[in-house]
Structure formats: structure tokens, C-alpha cells
Amino acid sequence: EGGGGCASANSSTSVVATTIRVQDQAIDFPPLADQWATNVVVLAATASSGLPVEFAVMDGPASIAGQTLTFTGAGPVAVAASQAGDSHWRPAPNQTNTFFVEKARAGVALGSLSRIHDGAPKEATVATDPEGLAVNVTYDGAANAPSATGSYEVVAAVAEALYAGGATGILIIAEATL
């Protein structure tokens, strides 16, 4: 070497070429069982490369935040696991799991089915478990509560994306006794 770190006529410089072999990889994404719409699923998959796996909803009533899968309704869901690769690993073939999401069961109870006629409409009371679910109620098939004396079939059906349930009963409106 000459002065100042510069190569002199007596020094030799060599260049070493390095070849990086890009490898194939695969994803192990175990099957997912059918789910209730109220479930929260933490997704797990591994790539043979050890690189992180990403998830995406390909179809159906679901959404993903990171590795957490939640549902927005009932129906078939397809979730894909992917790994894009890097300078040492080729992209892995996507692995997709398909399963069915069913609405969670809700309890429905009817009350106030025995009423006295006073000319005003008489509604049945409805309680749900879990509390506060939206419910459609009909009286002999009509949405309006009856006011006349008689017996009326009451049908209550949960009207929610994540829950299903219902109840039936008979509303009796009797004549007032003096």
C-alpha cells in the first residue's frame, strides 16, 4: 500500500463474488373449525422460512386486525395466509382455510301475555339473553299489537347480524269484569 491508504503498484486487489441461493418456502395454516358469529379467533400459521405470516379475509362476513379474526355475520368465510418472501426466500404459496360461521344462539322470553281489554293496544314484553338485542314481534302475523279481545299468536324473532333466536306464545286479551 502506498501512503494515505492508496493502493501502490506493488499491491493487489481482489473481488469476491457471493451467490445467494433463493429458497422455496411453505406455510402451515391448520384448518379452522366452524365458528359462532360472536367468537374472536387468534389466527396462527408458520412459514418454513421463519418469516412472519400475514392473513387476509378472501370472502365472507369477517374482518382481521393483525392476527385477530372477528365476524360481522353468518355465512361461509375464507381466510388466506401469505408470506411474501425476501432476498433469501421466494414467496410462499398462499394457504386458504374455508369454514362456516353461524349466528350465536340468543334466548328470548315473552311476558305480559294475559291482558285486560281497555281499548288500547296490548303488547307482549320481550326479554333477550344477552340483553338488549333487537327483536321483531308479530301478532297473528301483523306488526301492530292488537287491542280487541281475543287470542293472538305472538312470534318474536331476534333481528341481529350475530345472533339468532325466537319465541312464540299466545296473547290473551280478556273482557274486563265489573
Image (cartoon, grey):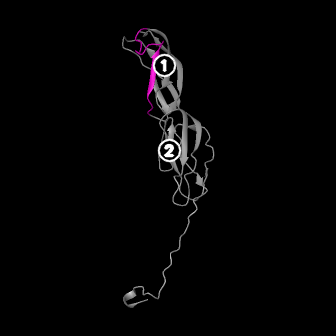
Look at mark 1 in the image and give the residue it sits on.
Answer: 113
| Residue type at numbered disc 2 | Ala
Q: Is residue 24 above or below residue 115?
A: below
Residue 105 seen in this snapshot: no
Kindly give the residue lying farthest to the front in the view shown: 9
Q: Circle 1: is it few (<14), some (14-19), or many (20+) Cα within 10 Å?
A: some
Residue 168 spot, x, y in % from top left: 53, 20
Q: Which residues are magenta?
A: 132-148
Q: Which mark is residue 56?
A: 2
Q: Circle 2: is it few (<14), some (14-19), or many (20+) Cα within 10 Å?
A: some
Residue under the image location 58 percent in, 62 percent down: 21
> Which quadrant of the figure has residue 144?
top left
Q: Secondary structure at mark 2?
A: strand
Q: Is residue 14 above or below residue 149?
A: below
Residue 52 seen in this snapshot: yes
Indicate yes or no whether the magenta region holds residue 130: no
Residue 84 versus residue 13: which sits nearer the camera?
A: 13
> Which quadrant of the figure has residue 115?
top left
Residue 86 versus residue 156: which sits nearer the camera?
A: 86
Q: Is residue 85 above or below residue 59?
A: below
Kindly give the residue lying farthest to the bottom in the view shown: 3
Residue 49 versus residue 177: which sits nearer the camera?
A: 49
Q: Secondary structure at mark 1?
A: loop
